[in-house]
Image (cartoon, rainbow, N blue to C red):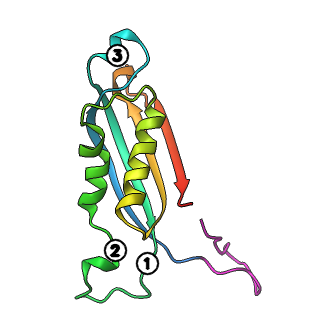
Amino acid sequence: MGQSIQPGAGAGTPPMDDMLVLEIDDLEVDVLTGIYSEETHLPQPLRISVRVLLTHAEHYAPDGPLNLTKNYMDLKHAATTAITRGQHFTLVEAVADHIIDTIFLQDRKARHVTVKIIKLALTEKSEKIGITLARWRK
């Protein structure tokens, strides 16, 4: 993303870029995913978090319209309904890519999307086993 000013930085240091990041964390979603026969016939529980870097307004007034940002429910839809319609994803990376593609299609203001997926079926002692995929709009 942008460069940040380090404490004590002097003149000539690039300023920190402003940004707007919408986030949803820890959605538990059952998704048809897996490569082994015992995984492919039943949905697997996944914990999904999504972060979206948006093109932002110069300023947000108290009465500003929703079209200056993005509806959080669109992110939830991309991470739940859009991936639970019977499609089987061999890899959780494909689940993450599907979420990212859905968000990029929803809104041109989405510049960068990060999706973190934890496979809950692999968790034994509160480990967090999974992937994080991040993509810039092309």
Residue 14 painted magenta: yes
Pointer 2 residue: 69
Q: Which residue is mark 3?
A: 39
Task: Give the numbered dot on residue 56.
Answer: 1
Kindly identify the residue that appears in the image at 38 percent across and 27 percent down: 126
Disc 2, SS: loop
Please identify the quarter of the rendering in which residue 47 is found.
Answer: top left
Q: In the picture, which quadrant includes the N terminus? A: bottom right
23 or 85: which is nearer to us? 85
Mark 3 and mark 2: Cα distance apart in space? 38 Å
Q: Image point 22% across, 88% down: which residue?
A: 63
Which span of residues is magenta-colored? 1-16
Quadrant showing the C terminus: bottom right
Residue 80, horizontal then vertical, whole percent:
26, 44
Q: Would you say 54 lies left or right of 106 here?
A: right
The residues tagged by marks 1 and 2 sit, at their Cα atoms, a distance apart of 7 Å
Q: CA distance from mark 3 to mark 1?
A: 41 Å
Say whether marks 3 and 1 touch (CB < 8 Å). Answer: no
Residue 87 x/y as whole percent = 31, 32
Local crowd size for mark 3, using a 10 Å CA cut-off: few (<14), some (14–19), many (≥20): some
In the picture provided, is 72 more to the left or to the right than 101?
left
Is residue 64 something one can see in this rendering? yes
Q: Element type at marker 3?
A: helix
Q: Is residue 93 above or below residue 107?
A: above
Majority secondary structure in the magenta region: loop
Residue 18 highlighted magenta (yes or no): no
- Identify the residue at image location x=37%, y=10%: 37
Disc 2 residue type (three-letter): Thr
